[in-house]
Image: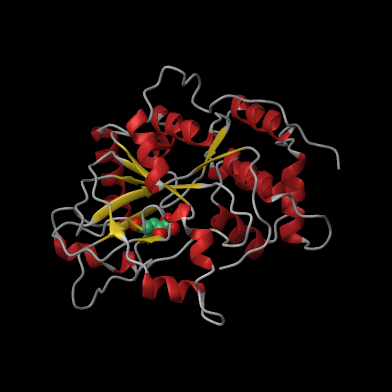
Amino acid sequence: MSETAESLGIEELRTYWACQCAPGSVAALPRDIEKTLLAGLRLNVLETLRYLHHEKPSYEQFEAWIRERNRGELKDVELDRLRYALAGESVGAEVGHIGDVDGLSADDLAHWDEHGYVILRNAIDRKAAEAAEAAVYDFLGMSRDDPESWYRESLGHSIWVPLLRHPALVANRRAPRIHKAHAQLWGREDLWVTIDQVGFNPPERDNWPFPGPHLHWDATLAEPHCFELQGILYLADVAEDQGAFSCVPGFHRTLKEWLKTVPAGVNVHDYARNTLTMKPIAAKRGDMIIWHHHLPHGSSPNRAQQPRVVQYMSLWPTRFAYTEEWLS
Ligand SMILES: O=C(O)CCC(=O)C(=O)O
């Protein structure tokens, strides 16, 4: 089909659409290309799949929906960066030159190697964190100073909050220090930031027990074990007992051996939950915790006085090694 003047002109997008709307009609994109495509078009994976599966749009309608989701703010320069990257050309950091940006220190990197996670202090400034925190409360129709408001219907029984594109969240995704730290860990700058949701984990009470997520991996446990990162940005101070992000430090180094100890016939996740202990990670407003995706991790019950408010985000290069087989 010939492209209209408004077409985004990205052939991989047409393949992605065909895969979802007419399964079997074309070969699926490699997983890394698919991730790059969605992140480059600033789309959240779940919202996109929901839209495609429920609406079954034409390709033109899909493109129009993408522009509408981005409030017409997909800039040519960003689309060009995506096109170049998909064509295998080298592209720099999304936020421009990051050579001089302060990233992870030598101590941070040593901590990373040993523990598989690192706290990027002041990943964003306090004002930016406060603005994003306020956006979460606004979206939920809650007030930071009114505990009764924290358990409104708007939350449901989950800590996930489907707020994706508030300007304060968008700004955080462009924080140079976040891009720099990820570039250091990945060893490259052609990174794409995911459009993830936010989280609200209020203090437990009788009719609101902590709903999870409990210890889990978001990674396949099949070999080869490839490198990927996940991240969480604290939008307000989080104490250890305040529903902190939790993980099993250092597990990225022992996963392979540990898997051999899982008794035959026992579910790996059940075994992990029964035998491993997670450490809650306290940090300040504006700090980001980045972790190796082989660390078992989860959130934790909030036994403090204030909710934990966070923004999720991870960064990936255009192409990366991954394992097809999904073992969990
Ligand atoms: O919210 C948290 O502390 C945990 C997040 C988590 O489990 C995840 O992102 O997979």
Q: Quadrant of the C terminus?
A: bottom right
**Residue 23, x across and y down, in percent:** 77, 63
Of 109 and 46, nearer the camera is 109
**Residue 46, x across and y down, in percent:** 55, 58
Q: Is residue 103 above or below residue 262?
A: above
Q: Let me know if residue 218 appears in the view.
A: no
Colouring chosen for the image of the structure: secondary structure
**Residue 21, x across and y down, in percent:** 74, 60
Q: Residue at x 74, y 35 (%)?
A: 9
Outermost residue on the bottom side: it is: 265
Residue 110, quarter of the rendered image: top left
Q: Quadrant of the N terminus?
A: top right
Q: Is residue 57 above or below residue 211?
A: above
**Residue 120, x across and y down, in percent:** 33, 37
Q: Which residue is drawn at 55% across and 34% down?
A: 191
Q: Let me know if residue 156 appears in the view.
A: yes
In the drawing, does residue 31 fall left or right of residue 121? right
